[in-house]
Amino acid sequence: MASQTVPQATAERLPLYYRTLQQLVANGKTRISSSKFGELVQIDSTTIRKDFSYFGALGRKGYGYDTQYLMDFLKKTLYQDELNRVILIGVGHLGTALLNHNFLKNNNTQIVRAYDVDPKKIGTEVSGTKVFAMDELAANDHHEIVAAILTVPAAHAQEAAEKALASGIRGFLNFSPTTLNLPENAYVRHVDMTVELQALIYFLNHSMETKNS
Amino acid sequence: MASQTVPQATAERLPLYYRTLQQLVANGKTRISSSKFGELVQIDSTTIRKDFSYFGALGRKGYGYDTQYLMDFLKKTLYQDELNRVILIGVGHLGTALLNHNFLKNNNTQIVRAYDVDPKKIGTEVSGTKVFAMDELAANDHHEIVAAILTVPAAHAQEAAEKALASGIRGFLNFSPTTLNLPENAYVRHVDMTVELQALIYFLNHSMETKNS
DNA sequence: TAAGGATTGTGAAATAAAGAACAAATGAAT
DNA sequence: ATTCATTTGTTCTTTATTTCACAATCCTTA
Ligand SMILES: NC(=O)c1ccc[n+]([C@@H]2O[C@H](COP(=O)([O-])OP(=O)(O)OC[C@H]3O[C@@H](n4cnc5c(N)ncnc54)[C@H](O)[C@@H]3O)[C@@H](O)[C@H]2O)c1
Ligand SMILES: NC(=O)c1ccc[n+]([C@@H]2O[C@H](COP(=O)([O-])OP(=O)(O)OC[C@H]3O[C@@H](n4cnc5c(N)ncnc54)[C@H](O)[C@@H]3O)[C@@H](O)[C@H]2O)c1
């Protein structure tokens, strides 16, 4: 069905649309046009209409989109109408920050367990989440876990991912600055602040050049 | 010059290339072919050769690329041969994690100052970086600062960005889940873990459907 | 209920990016 | 020196994404 025709670029914009609609609904806005919505998310209105059109006719001509309806639709489409359980590997600086973040509030996501190798951390609890030893990764049943968040040092990311994969986890959100080599049935998204910072600096310098010529 | 012809997609891959070359050089590899390199970064070798070709002939036919030379070239291209000074706004869970991260080690980047509104945080030092009050943002001279890292609550991100912009900062790395509305001469990159997590879950579910049909 | 204004949904065109294929050049081996 | 294997740089093709343009349709208001 839809999955075969929805372009990747469209799918990657859906979470942004969803979040923006949550805010609109929270603010009591009941309807919005593609052009107003486009201003909010800083995306061309045509792109927005095209994106929505892959899922059928979600709007009404001459009226726009019903925010509540659209939000509910995206909620289902993004599987946000069910709880998404994830685990976290690597309870260091970044891992602790993530554990302290309440993903349940606006996202239906919960970090249900954390794992680490440090004996000082194993057995403790961070913001209500228990920290287990890596050995227990294999022992624990992970069929109900959607994804693993990797916040280990780069040198150990591959190894950690493989252990998670072996325990039945196929989705990874990798914060380590390293490329993971995993089988095809795994899916990785990479959040790399270093790359973002360097790209930012590159574009800053080059937008100057462009403007000066 | 180059800036006018280098595609955006290419520019965004350069940091990944640079980091991978750093590792190769560190491991004593003196040469590499585009296909071997492509395996490492999981990008088609043609794309890699094309990417490099925008900067001229960086390799040698029948030989490949000299890792040291290529690394040095990218170092300059990405402005990593000079220190990049940034500030951080919002010393909370995530901000503290970032302050504890040594960006100087592999990236020539330093968080020189931090800002917050919390009186309990102002005046303290986190991992060697002093925390200032927001009022001082305007007072401080920021002409040598390349970018601001935003780790404030979403509701305050716009306001914080505007203050930084007023003090002369044009680059932003925004970790808050909100779209910033800034003038054209500003450049924003958005790191949104919520979006990444939802996209991950979407693609996981849909790759399943595809495989089953 | 009719008219006018607003706004969608979508083909067609334009742009951007990725991938295939290969001649040209180099390195390596004998 | 000569041959052969390697690998780049690049042209051409294909695929993906964005943008344009507008008929079709629905809302609104008088
Ligand atoms: N801290 C940041 O702000 C930041 C910024 C950019 C990137 N990163 C990346 O995120 C990752 C984590 O960064 P951090 O600052 O939290 O590091 P950290 O050193 O504070 O934490 C790493 C944690 O992983 C654990 N660990 C080490 N090896 C492990 C293994 N094999 N299996 C399981 N756990 C293991 C350690 O015990 C530690 O608790 C690193 O790859 C880092 O490069 C962090
Ligand atoms: N913690 C995470 O792992 C995580 C994950 C995803 C997204 N985020 C986003 O990152 C941002 C920060 O998250 P956090 O967990 O560190 O939050 P936090 O509440 O721990 O920290 C926010 C900090 O910003 C300061 N602050 C508030 N208003 C300010 C203002 N107007 N000017 C300057 N400083 C101000 C607060 O005093 C506090 O120190 C949020 O937008 C959050 O949604 C965080």
Image (spheres, coloured by chain):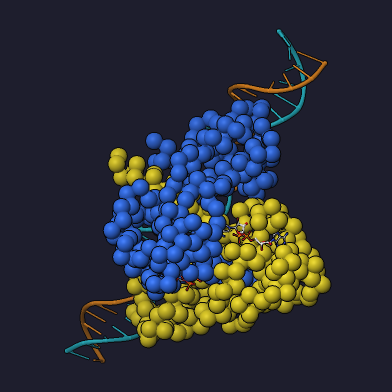
Chain colours: A blue, B yellow, C cyan, D orange
Does any portion of residue B84 appear in the rendered image?
no
Residue at 59% across / 64% down in the picture?
Answer: B93
* Whether residue A119 is visible: yes
Quadrant in which residue B28 is drawn: bottom left
Q: From the viewer's perspective, is A16 left or right of C25?
A: right
Residue A169, image quadrant? bottom left
Count numbered badges in the picture: 0
Seen in the picture, residue B207 relative to A57 is either above or below; the reply is below
Work out whether A99 lies above or below A5.
below
Between A31 and A143, the one lying in front of the other is: A143
Q: Which quarter of the image is occupied by the C terminus of chain A? A: bottom right
Residue D13 % position (x, y): 39, 53
Query: Relative to B121, is A74 on the left or the right?
Result: left
Q: Residue at x 52, y 35 (%)?
A: A73
Q: Nearer the viewer, residue B147 or B35?
A: B147
Q: Residue at the location (49% across, 64% down)?
A: A95
Percent x, y of residue A157? 39, 68
Looking at the image, residue A96 lies above or below residue A11:
below
> Quick one: A107 or B31, which is closer to the camera?
A107
Left or right placement of residue A128 versus residue B213 in this view: right
Percent x, y for residue B48?
A: 43, 68
Tell me which residue sits at (29%, 41%) in the image.
Answer: B212
The percent position of residue B102, horizontal first and vertical second, equals: 55, 77
Give the position of the N terminus of chain A as an image quadrant. top left
